[in-house]
Image (cartoon, rainbow, N blue to C red):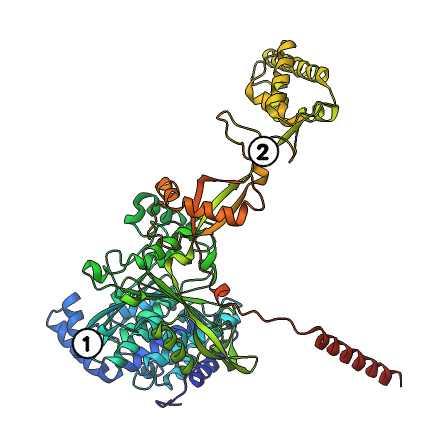
Amino acid sequence: MNNSANHNHSELVGFVFNIANKLRGPYRPPQYRKVMLPMIVLRRLDCVLEPTKDKVLTDYEKLKAKGLKDKALHSALARVASKDRKQPLYNISKYTFQKLLEDPDNIGKNLIAFINGFSPKAKEIFEFFKFEQEVEKLSKANRLYLIIKEFANLDFHPDKISNIEMGYVFEELIRKFNEQANEEAGDHFTPREVIKLMAHIIYTDYDEIYKEGIVRTVYDPTCGTGGMLSVSEEYIYSNNAKANVVLFGQEYNDEAYAICTSDLLIKDEDVDNIIYGDTLGDGKTSDGHPDKKFHIMKANPPFGVEWKPEEDYVKKEYNDFGFDGRFGPGLPRINDGSLLFLLHMISKMHKSPEDGGEGSKIAIIFNGSPLFTGDAGSGESNIRRWIIENDLLDAIIALPDQLFYNTGIFTYIWFVTNRKPKERKGKVQLIDATKHFQKMKKSLGNKRNELSEEHISEITRLYAENKSNAISKVKIDGATEDRVCSKIFKNTDFGYIKVTVERPLRLNFLVIDERIERLKLENAFIELAESKKKKDKKKILEEEQEGTEQQKGIIDALIKMKSNKLYKNRDEFVKVLDKNIKDNGLKIEAKLKKAILNALSEKDPTADICMDSKGNPEPDPDLRDNENISLPEKIKLPLPLDYDNKTGLEELVELVKDHCEEYMKKEVLPHVPDAWVDYSKTKLGYEIPINRHFYVYKPPRELEKIEGDIKKVEKDILDMLKEAVK
């Protein structure tokens, strides 16, 4: 079967899957990927090299005869395979798929020779696939000849199936294989229409990409099979064929890395720009581009995945380098490392135009967690604060649910840049695109919705026009409605001051049997009869007896104090208690005295306020509360509080105290007049409640209509019962 240029990639996926079913027996369906994915790459490379195969073999012998070897031989063969290629790609074995079929008895050994005959980078791809062990298994199971024969009938040349189409094929196959393995589908890729939307937004107001000969670097730190890089490249070239786009990435999944590098190699792009390893760092691998800066960065890091494997490396960088490293503002909780990828990408930005650089643009996909998770002063909040206070956050787009292959949840694209145009400076645009979608004819995993070209254009329009309360027509329950889908906020709108509100401690005191018994449960009282000695049994016994006697003395002294008199002033009661202790010849440490007062007291809102040694009201921990107060209207960013939540606190309090006191007068003191703020515990928080800003209240239906529906249902039930009785 020879496929034509218009061969639909879905049909091709189906055909490949039919070949995969021939593996049943030696392989279970979840294992098909181990054979099919490297076999597709191998056949595609075979198709690319076939036109120059004979000449390469002839020249290979001539070059060897001249004494060329190693790098010199490598470069010469690369020129023979393709005069225009920059990245060497050739094969010096005598085999092709067709020739492998000519020797069925030795097909396994010959296939290994075929793979080993590739140029170094191509050969490395199959090492990451770990394909050699699968060849041995296929050969023993008598399946290898059958599979190669089927693939030999497919023309995978890029002239027949473009790199973009082949990307679709790989992604769809991976999704189907993962479904069979009951794993998370779509772990390595993002729906192409989402990547297109990211490209449309990120290149809006980016006039440089239309200049002839412009060089732009594109980077994806979690590049998977390379979908984001390919679509970004295609977008730029479709608008400027004379641009120079250089792709960079990093990936730690062997299979995805192999597919991505094979795609770049076939396109004759620098495979060395794709690094294998953990971008955050796991002790063995780390940032593969430590000294590089990039113009465009896009990523879809894993959602809600803990960063335990990277914890030691990341924390060491954070503690040792602070803001000179990648993670200066803070670290998120261990169960979700997605914000670490954004910090990593920000560290790769070119200097802003204001600082003499070209600036950079970032688009990254998150779930809802990075918008609001983490209290004021937490790692997540501090990361949001640093990004917003440095005016890096440009826009966030809320996407529809059921848009991704591996999850049905709502997702959000963050756009981050240090090259905002003047009209966007100091502001953030939020776009609600949750209703901009159409239902798919056939769902793919969790993906039931998709963005059409019209939806992408409409969302791009909302972004480009940059208007608050911009209206868009959306479909809700089958009806078209006008909805506000864009809002503009000042950076300060996302910040808040978290203050600790204290209320005074009020206690009454009463010496009665019930409260005296409570003393016996106080740790300080119990410890009196416990020895601190460990080995000397005699000393231990002596100390325990001495402590027991002291306990008895205290209890006896309190029994003498027994009275029904209720004290509502602590200082007054302490004077009476001190006199009693002295009269009974007792010496009591402060810790024990505190335990006695605790046992004999109860909270009493009618009692006098307890004062500390400086004459200030003592706070009641049980009445302690917090208030989140929005930032003052005209406050300037960044704020003076450091990210350790301590340095610069006095300066911050000086800026916001009047604002907070005004809030207290309006919102708190009318309800609890004795409350006050403990400014020493003040923290700064940032959150982005995008869903709240676009919430549309729908009043409940009228009771009469609900009652009518209930009566109709009741009537229908009665009618059905009558029919059943008949």
**Lateral position of residue 536 relative to residue 128, left or right:** right
Q: Residue at x 45, y 76 (%)?
A: 142
634, above or below 690, in the image: above
Q: Type of residue at label 2?
A: Leu
Residue under circle 2?
505
Quarter of the image that includes the N terminus: bottom left
Check disc 2: other Cα within 10 Å, few if <14, some if 14-19, many if 20+: many
Coordinates of residue 441 in the picture (x, y in percent): 52, 84
Q: Position of residue 509 (x, y in %)?
A: 66, 26
Q: Is residue 34 above or below residue 637?
A: below
Q: Dot 2 lies on which element?
A: loop
The residue positioned 28% from the left and 61% from the top of the image is: 418
Name the side, left or right, on which 344 lies relative to 611. left
Left or right, residue 24 beside residue 130: right
Q: Measured from the top left, where is residue 305 in percent x and y?
A: 46, 58
Disc 1 residue type (three-letter): Lys
Q: Nearer the viewer, residue 683 or 718?
A: 683
Which of the pair 608/439 is nearer the observer? 608
Q: Which mark is residue 472?
A: none
Between tags 2 and 1, which lies in front?
2
Look at the numbered discs 2 and 1 and tell me whether their residues touch, using CB distance below 8 Å: no
Which residue shows up at 63% across the image and 18% down it?
577
Q: Which x, y percent locates residue 658?
A: 42, 45
At mark 1, the secondary structure is: loop
Image quadrant containing the C terminus: bottom right
Q: Quadrant of residue 571?
A: top right
Location of mark 1 (residue): 211
